[in-house]
Amino acid sequence: MTSQAHDSPWQRPDGSAPPNPGRPGSASLVDPEDDLPSADYGGDFETTTIPPYDSRNGGSTGFSLLGDSEPLPYVQPQSSGRHAALGPAEIDPDDDERYGPVDRRGTQDLGLLLLRLALGALLVVHGLQKLFGWWGGQGLTGFKNSLSDTGYQYADILSYVAVGGQIVAGVLLVLGLFTPVAAAGALAYLLNGVLAAASAHGGVRHLAFFGPDGQEYQITLIAIAAALVLTGPGKYGFDAGRGWARRPFIGSFIALLLGIGGGVALWVLLNGANPLS
């Protein structure tokens, strides 16, 4: 501890007024900064190193808090930018591309394969019956005559188009290739068959849906075709990697409307009879 000489009063560094003249002459003022160690002080017996008081060199010491306001007792740590995005996230179980293959479909794809094979094989066999007369079929000439008797125009050209479209749609369904388009084409063809039967029986009111002359067979095939348009082919086919096989939605509705609208349009344009009368 050091102090100023008694014969010269201590002067403040900032040039402020001298101390109170009423203070006794024997009293001396002590600069509190004199108690701090020098910057090169190595500590007692060189066992303790006391950090320097001056923190202007970039160091942060406990002594630098003498002139600062009292710090908060705890500061919430902030997340760095690298980890800021980490956190709980909702995982979509159907997002196979991001989180790896997740097989949750069970036997659904196998059932879709069975439906495709059944409908496709029926379409191909019936088309070959109409085209070549195989398996007791009527042949192409008999099919032309049946179209003319039902009231279709341009029966010569329409017979080739109908038979070719039926066989192609059946093959595509068996392969699982362009399944919504193939199922929509089969739906349009099958709808014309039901409308032709209704027109031949004097309208839908006189159409037998059940019984020996019923149309439950054609209606069942229509339901299968519509179901394949909406569900897609499944993963056992050439369309396995396409969107309508994994997540059919908007495109399937469009294909269904096109199949129904196309069948009705073909009937109206090429036949024109009112099947409701």
Image (tube, helix red, strand yellow):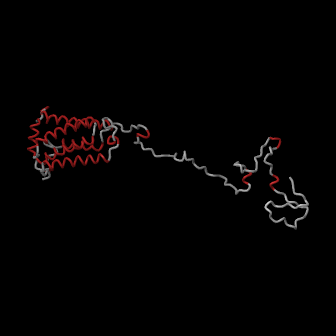
Q: Is 21 placed left or right of 167 in the picture?
A: right
**Residue 20 figure quarter:** bottom right
Above or below: residue 71 compared with residue 237: below
**Residue 18 figure quarter:** bottom right
Above or below: residue 167 compared with residue 51: above
Above or below: residue 34 compared with residue 101: below
Farthest residue to the front: give it: 15
Q: What x and y, as percent, mark residue 102?
A: 41, 38
Q: Is 256 placed left or right of 9 in the picture?
A: left
**Residue 154 in view of the camera:** yes
**Residue 224 in view of the camera:** no
Farthest residue to the top: give it: 135
Q: What x and y, as percent, mark residue 216?
A: 18, 43
Residue toward you, 212 or 186: 186
Farthest residue to the bottom: give it: 22
Q: Residue at x 59, y 50 (%)?
A: 78
Residue toward you, 236 or 23: 23
Q: What x and y, as percent, mark residue 241?
A: 34, 38
Q: Residue at x 13, y 52 (%)?
A: 274
Instruction: Count up the numbered dots.
Output: 0
Residue toward you, 73 or 32: 32
Q: What x and y, as percent, mark residue 21?
A: 87, 67
Q: Residue at x 55, y 47 (%)?
A: 81
